[in-house]
Image: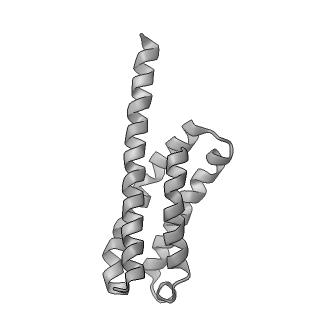
Amino acid sequence: MQRIDTLLSHVWMVRAFLKHSPEAEEDEELCEVHRTLYDYMLALGGPLKERNAAAYLAQARKKLSKLRKARDDFAALQPQVSTHTNFQMANASLTAAVDEIARVLVAAERDEARQSAISKD
């Protein structure tokens, strides 16, 4: 839970950058990317506040496909929107953070399965 929340700080910065960029005012698809990033983080806020790791991880898994789609959409849009270094770095940062979140979720699922198998023995 803590590792994902740390990674979400990168997602938040990309979201803030996109939201406040003049380019986003002109591009509805780009607006949809920053809205999706916000929705993902908002969905995890309650379980994080309650320190409910099981609910947090379940929600993170449930919404991961939308987060990945936002990553992919931004990667496709970015060269068309701007080739400025800030946009390139935002793309790299979002890609790295989302990929690492996915890896953390896979590892957590493996750990949960192992713990379940151990407790059945």
Of all residues, the one furthest to the top in this rendering is 121
Give how far across and how far down residue 118 sits, in percent: 42, 16
- What residue is drawn where x is 55% and y is 62%? 39
Position of 71 with respect to 11 (left or right) is left
Please state the horizontal and vertical placement of residue 18, each as a whole percent of the image.
50, 78
Quadrant of the drawing holding the N terminus: top right
| Quadrant assignment for the C terminus | top left
Q: Quadrant of residue 111?
A: top left
Position of 79 with respect to 97 (left or right) is left
Nearest the viewer among 3 and 31 is 3
Does the image show residue 70? no
Residue at the (42%, 59%) spot, across then down: 97
Residue 5 vs residue 45, the one in the foreground: 5
Give the vertical position of 67 relative to 19 (above or below): above
Residue located 44% across and 29% down the image: 112
Image position of 77 (left or right of 55): left
Image position, residue 94 (x, y; %): 41, 65
Front-most of 73 and 88? Answer: 88
Colour style of the rendered protein structure = one colour
Please say if 117 is above or below 57: above
Residue, far right: 50
Marks counted in the figure total: 0
The relative height of residue 51 versus residue 35 in the rendered view (above or below) is: above
Q: Residue at x 62, y 39 (%)?
A: 52
Residue 121 in view in this figure:
yes
